[in-house]
Image (cartoon, rainbow, N blue to C red):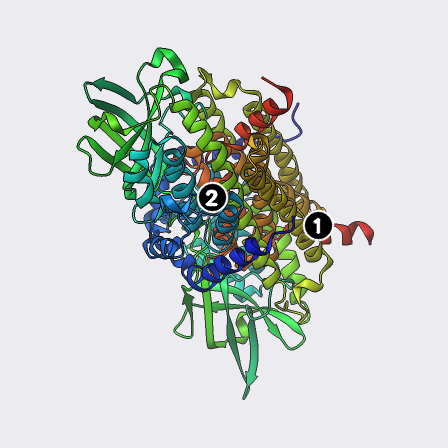
Amino acid sequence: MILSDAHRQFQAKVRGFAEKEVAPCARDLDRDGEFPWKFVKRLAELQLTAIYVPKEYGGAGLDTLHYAIAVEEIGRVCGSTGIFLAAHSSLGVFPIYYAGNEEQKQKWLIPLAKGEKIGSFGLTEPEAGSDAAATKTTAKRDGDKYILNGEKRFITSGSVADVIIVTATQDPSKGYQGISAFIVEKGTPGFTYGKDEEKLGLHGSITSELIFEDCVIPANNLLGEEGDGFKIFMETLDGGRISIGALALGIGQGALDAAVNFSKSNNKSGKPLSRSQAVQSMIAEMATDIEAARLLVYQAAALKDAGMPYVKEAAMAKYYASTVGMKAADMAIDIHGLLGITDAYPVERFIRDEKLMEIGEGTSEIQKIVIARQILGK
Amino acid sequence: MSIIKMNSEQKLIRGEIRKFATAELDPIAADIEKDCRIPPEIVKKISQMGLFGFTVPEQYGGSGLNVTTLCVALEELSKSCASLALMVAVNNCFVVRSISEFGSPQIKDKYLKRISNGSIGGYVPHTETEIAGQEFKIESDGGETFLSGRSDIALNSAAADFFVIPALHGQGVALYIVDKSESFMNSYSIRTMGMCGAGVTGVESKRAKLKEEDRLVEEAKGREAVQFLDDHARISFSSIALGLNEAALDASIKYSKERKQFGRAICEFPMVRDMLSEIKVSVERSRLLVYEAASRTDENEDYSQIARMACLTSCEGAVFSALKAIQIHGGYGYTRDYPVERHFRDAKTLQVLGGRPVDLKSKIAEEILS
């Protein structure tokens, strides 16, 4: 896909930031499991925290394609910073932008969009993963309040977020129709945190357990109407898939970059590794796969921007980009050889980070079901 | 009837190792990962069980067991702790094997006995296709011989008190035994993705003096010797991969039966069953090649080709199975609460240590075409 001048200039700007500021810290963020606070601030300064949100609500007033490009470029050097950006923009900001009333937008969307506050999305539960509609967290209406009870798990940026969109059911017997979405602020009494997960990768990203014990929130914190929760989270995840697809693409591209760079080194016989046909074959395969993934990701974003159906394309983009990204990261390790399994080079980090892209915001298996349903009908 | 038959001794050893692993290793698996080391008392117990000197001939105080029996032990050990299995494999297949194959009677007497008494040896991999700058060189100066250089990857290096080192010497490669000393020591500049308990670190030599009597292989024959040792070690590496493959299968079967989504156990979903069956096929395919390679070695047949195929299949299979196992476990699989993310890191690390798939394939092709 040929990018417009505006998109290309934007890409160059984000790439410059990613390469100059983020890349040098990526290894340490992973090694020390440090949340990238300094980049949260810089992303806000560069107006990257809500790229597709209109300026009147604190965003950059650009489109989804700009957003996908930004996540790709950050992910190319640091998966942890990339997933922070994707989770904040797609999961924290989007539900309020999509379903919030004017008062809610003024109060929460603007500071989130400006990056003054961190947003997160509490959907997954210990017993409700792929089966997100099986939510057990309950919301009980009590006059002008709701009382939340339950537990959320695997919540990206959960324990550092200022504002979390939490799904809960008012009537478990109604299944997905009983689910509503609520805005919960950090520090609300009755809202505490369990442990942060120790993970295979994305060590600089925080993944939290959220615990609600008689957590009382004002009725005004309901997003949309009661029972809108399912619609809101499905819409949120549809868009979120574009950003995870973009992140998977970025990490895959990062692995390719590293492999190309490394293959310029000489082997013990004094010949560049790139002289080997086997290495050339792997580089060609990786580059082709990643280019195809880029087309799918950009296409899904462009369809969304054009107001056209994009659910199938977003699922395809996420599924494909994460699959080929894993393959590319694996090949990149093989090209590096013994040093590829060490943290002296970034490729082992890329494969650990990339694996989440096949799981988070809908596993590859769920993406296949989404795609098949779009093609075959329900 | 299965073509793989275990004799009573092998069954006994497998049972003992399973008992030990369940009692001593499984409870501390998470600590081993966190501390990046296996507690010395565990290593000592394994040593007392005779595993580090498993293949040392009985005349030097070892157990004198064959490669098939070693593979049985490694497979079982690897299911619980691949790092420990790797340490045992390196000691037996690189260190013991290089000494018993190439060592002078004096070297054998000295070092094999040391191993039988609980000493662990290290090995520095030497691959021509690796990048330059990661090797050792031998220089002669005034009638004395010195070793210089560094490698970021040395096997068993944290636990070893001596190393077998292939080093460039003139146009060739010579193999020497070097003791740890002030001029030959560990460097800790890197961390490996997996096998974190195995003590794979760097080693560095600042003009360590080499003793002529500690030379294992002269420079003209070193490349061939390295190839021989690599192929030999590959059989044991593939049995470790087989163990990882099985561990991923066991964890996945258990989890997919317990985990319920959409009102039923996830093992009832066709996409999960598909993954489970693929992992199982990988286990069985690997097992056939691993034990075929091991038994050819024990029967003194040519095994280099089958060893490479076993390693290629078994390691690729272990990586594949661990990734599928993580996928079956979903978000939980991505965390350290379940063993499958470790299986993946261990499997990928092992695969690269056993030889990159491209290199193995090119060697297999070379041999079938010659």
Quarter of the image holding residue A97?
Answer: top left
Q: Three-letter amino acid code at disc 1?
A: Lys
What residue appears at the point 54 percent right and 32 percent down from the top-left corner? A364
Q: CA distance from mark 1 to mark 2?
A: 25 Å
> Helix, strand or loop at disc 1?
helix
What residue appears at the point 62 percent right and 36 percent down from the top-left corner? B286
Depth order, front residue of A313/A223: A223
Where's the C terminus of chain A, which quadrant?
Answer: top right
Marked residue chain, label 1: B
Single out the residue that lies furthest toward the bottom: B142
> Helix, strand or loop at disc 2?
helix
Q: Which residue is mark 1?
A: B361
Task: Using residue A168 as the reference point, say whether residue A293 is left or right of it.
Answer: right
Q: B109 above or below B213?
A: above
Q: Which residue is mark 2?
A: B82
Q: Position of residue A248 (x, y in %)?
A: 53, 45
